[in-house]
């Protein structure tokens, strides 16, 4: 209950200073747009780079994997699985970057000690 009251008070305080809140939001957008996170699978056979906006920026496949994909169905299935694993790894790493940036900005504007769901206000 006290978490919820504290969250309500903090949010009410922020609403009084919308410019500060808007600036924090813009800093988060700018930082995450420039952020890059790498994911890989198969011991580096597939490497994927994702942006902080959770978009895939690039993908690299080793020549051996590419050659094997042309050889047989089993290798193509393995390659598909490795690509999916690398994409998921990159996206998870990008999400972690976004969460760190949001937490950093929340701390800077006085919301740093609140629970992730704002004391139950978001649930």
Image (cartoon, rainbow, N blue to C red):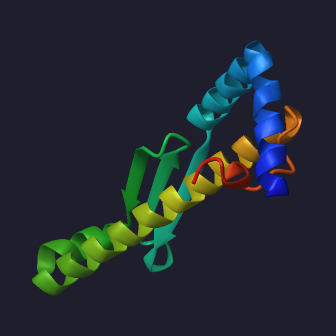
Residue lying at the far top in this picture: please name it.
Answer: 19
Q: Quadrant of the C terminus?
A: bottom right
The image shows residue 74 at horizontal and vertical percentages of: 17, 86
Which residue does the image show at 73% across and 16% down from the upper left? 18
Q: In the rendered view, would you say 122 is above or below 24?
A: below
State the residue lying farthest toward the front: 1
What is the x, y in percent for residue 9?
A: 83, 36
Residue drawn at the location 67% of the way across and 27% of the way down: 25
Screen quadrant of the N terminus? bottom right
Residue at the image point whose x is 30% and y is 73% from the top:
65
When the figure is inspected, residue 45 is found, relative to residue 25, above or below; the finding is below
Q: Position of residue 51 (x, y in %)?
A: 52, 43
Can you tell which quarter of the image residue 7 is in?
A: top right
**Which residue is the extreme one toward the bottom?**
74
Q: Nearer the viewer, residue 49 or 92?
A: 92
Tell me if I can see residue 105 in this picture: no
- Residue 72 picture quarter: bottom left
Residue in the foreground of this view, choosing between 40 and 23? 23
Q: Position of residue 27 (x, y in %)?
A: 70, 26
Of 36 and 52, nearer the camera is 52
- Residue 9 shows up from this direction: yes
Q: Specify whether 115 is left or right of 67.
A: right
Q: What residue is shown at x 20% (from left), y 79% (from top)?
A: 77
Specify whether 30 is left or right of 72.
Answer: right
Q: In the drawing, does residue 81 fall left or right of residue 15?
A: left
Q: Nearer the viewer, residue 35 or 103?
A: 103
């Amino acid at each position: 209950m006290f978490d919820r009251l504290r969250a309500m008070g903090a949010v009410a305080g922020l609403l009084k200073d919308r410019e500060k809140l808007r600036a924090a939001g813009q800093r988060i957008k700018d930082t995450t747009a420039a952020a890059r996170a790498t994911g890989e699978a198969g011991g580096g056979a597939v490497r994927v780079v994702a942006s902080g906006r959770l978009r895939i920026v690039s993908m690299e496949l080793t020549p051996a994997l590419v050659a094997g994909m042309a050889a047989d169905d089993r290798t193509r299935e393995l390659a598909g699985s490795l690509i999916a694993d690398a994409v998921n790894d990159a996206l998870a790493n990008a999400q972690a970057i976004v969460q760190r940036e949001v937490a950093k900005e929340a701390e800077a504007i006085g919301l740093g000690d609140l629970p992730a769901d704002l004391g139950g206000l978001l649930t």
